[in-house]
Amino acid sequence: MELPLDHFRLIGVSPSATSEEILRAFQLRLDKTPDEGFTYEVLTQRSELLRLTADKLTDPESRREYENLLLNGSSGLEFSSNREVAGLILLWESGSPKEAFKIAKKALQPPQTPALGSSRESDLTLLAALTARDSAIQEQKLRSYSNAADFLSEGIQLLQRMGKLVDIRKDLEEDLLSLLPYRILDLLSRDLNDQDSHKKGLSMLENLIIKRGGLEGNNKSEYGNYLNQQEFEAFFQQIKPYLTVQEQIDLFLELQKRGSLEAGFLAFISLTAIGFSRRKPEKLFEARRMLKKLNLSGLDSMPLVGCLDLLLADIDQASARFSSSSDENLRDWLNNYPGNKLEAICIFCKNWLENDVLVGYRDIESKEVDLDSWFENIEIQEFIEKLEKKSTKTLFKSSLQNQTIKKDSSIKNTEEFDSQLDNFDERGLPWPGGIKKEYDNLYTSENEIKDEILKNKPVEFYKYLIEKVAELKFSFGEFLKDKELVNLSPYFIYLYVFLTLFAFGIGIGLLRNNFKKSIQNEPEVVKPLIAVDKKSKVFNKEIIQESKNKSTNELNPFKNIQASNNSVSVEELTKASPSLEEIRNLINVWLLSKSNYLAGKNEVNLTKIVRNGLIERTIEERKGDIKKGIYKEIDSRIRKISLESQTSSRIVVLVELDYLERIIKNSGEFVNETSLTPLKVKYILGFSKKSWKLVDFVSGL
């Protein structure tokens, strides 16, 4: 057998070494005999080969002849069959483990397979294992981690086939496991044209994270002994820039399905990145929806959702989100910002995109964010316009598209028709003189309100009309259910509605004067404060009903709520035009019941006065607290309530609360306290199924 080895390398000296240096190296090699478990026979042959080499190189004539052979192109040394294993050991010791492994592996395969149980088989197997490990180490130093893993895998397979050296095989397996992160880095960092390597690396990365129990490392897996959470996070930050944004989205969504909350948050970040960088606002909608479903402990999601609202041109909602942030420092910064609040929100959003969102992707160039270019983009503008049109589209269109209605679905369709009537604008009613026209006349001057109209149309009169229209809607809805008119053509229904409302309007006009006189004879109880917004031309009505004789105790917001032993008496609010005091009581019932539920004292059962969607959100919040092992003690007291807008189907009130929230562990340990005085909240009520219900609220206006 010829080995890629010369006498100088065999003994471990340079070609220019003197005889004294050669003899000294020879003695050192003899004294440093491998102790890994080779047989005495092969070690003896090794010593004999070293002695022959030393004799040859220290004899001037023999050395001169050998050097001439090297100059003439001679390479390699021939070894007899009984000495080839010893020669392989010397080749390994000379710093060529890869060559020694390949030859030893070949020598263990047919037709060269040594006799079973022979010393040759034992020495070759041990040498193959040792050279496989040293070859892997050598490749690691060159950062060729995939090649290093290949050497370890081949060594493990060989030992499994030979059925020997179990302990060394386990060492090789542990080395292979510890090499996995580096293999993944090697495969993913290659050029994207090498798709096979990239896909292999991506698959290995996903399997690694799954075996660890998600990004959080919840499972005590085989990787736990050498790759702790801190080391894994450092590795993942290094690997992330080699993945495209879509690859990260797919990876994180898959991990989220398996229960990784951290992956869900990273999926939200990646969706935001692709939405902003590729000008795909629909991805921002998806990201916002995902963030709202996450329940990450300690995450203040309000500013992040606010940034998405800003990018979707919903300025009011964005401002409300930031004001609802639990980060006191952020709120202080916003409140004390020298410019306007919108400018501050834009700066926050810009920094967030630059530093947290648009970084760490192979196919997204990190650069300065330009929000102006985002809003100037034609596709973005068209998308936002479509959203606005979609949000203002009436429900009558859906009725026109469903002209064939089955009898067995008459009740359902009647309810749909009721909801359509909820959106009817009473200002368009054909009352004598046209009330819509008189509303429009209020804006003939931007700075003044016509006193004449206010005198002729008191607020009580408008309330009366609203109440009567609501009653008409109830009676008409019941009439539809009794007569099953919903099975007729929609055009007939619309004609009937118009004629009914027209007749009712005329009747109201005839009764107007008598009603007006009765109102004028009554003492004035409430003085409406009506202001006109010059830009939007929307009425902002604020009716303050605070009696001068009320004592401090009488201002308790819970005075009209029947509560005992943490239970709340819930009554429907069926009056078509409820007073502010009645609305206050409804909100108080909601606040008290929600407070008791989040404190774990009772169930929340407010379907009579609260929409199911709002109740479900409260239940989800409590479930999240239960998982965290906490409960909340909330004290909310209404300081002030004012009416912002009111129609027959929708009421919006502005409320100022004294708000105190304490978070306490189930063990009784105090965690945190939040106090907001005042907390401004906008409550929205809707008229459905003959009663008013709380639909939604927006905090921090």
Image: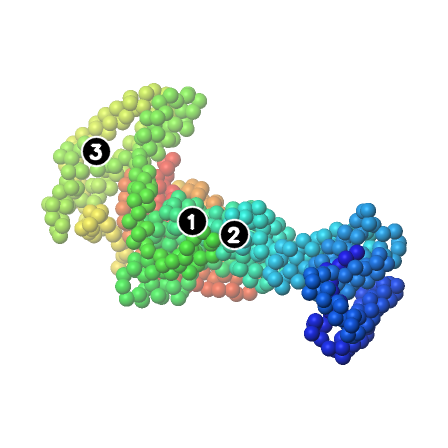
**Residue at image location 84% in from the left, 60% down from the top:** 83
**Residue at image location 22% in from the left, 43% down from the top:** 460
Which residue position holds label 1? 274
User: Relative to 71, is 662 on the left or the right?
Assistant: left
Q: Earlier in the sequence, mark 1 or mark 2?
A: 2
Number of the front mark, 2 or 3: 2
Q: Disc 1 on helix, strand or loop?
A: helix
Asked whether 34 or 96 is in front, the reply is 96
CA–CA distance in space, label 2 to label 3 = 70 Å
Residue 152 in the image, given as x and y percentages of width and height: 70, 56
User: Relative to 29, is 695 on the left or the right?
Assistant: left
Residue contact between numbered discs 2 and 3, judged by CB atoms under 8 Å? no
Task: Name the residue type under label 1.
Answer: Ile
Which quadrant would residue 504 be assigned to in this image? top left
Number of the front mark, 1 or 3: 1
> Eyeballing the image, is 321 above or below 398?
below
Neighbours of disc 2 within 10 Å: few (<14), some (14-19), many (20+): few
Q: Earlier in the sequence, mark 2 or mark 3?
A: 2
Which residue position holds label 2? 191
Task: Name the residue type under label 2.
Answer: Asp
Asked whether 244 or 353 is in front, the reply is 244
**Residue at image location 21% in from the left, 27% down from the top:** 503
Residue 356 in the image, given as x and y percentages of width and height: 44, 59
**Residue at image location 43% in from the left, 24% down from the top:** 409
Which residue position holds label 3? 429
CA–CA distance in space, label 1 to label 3 = 48 Å
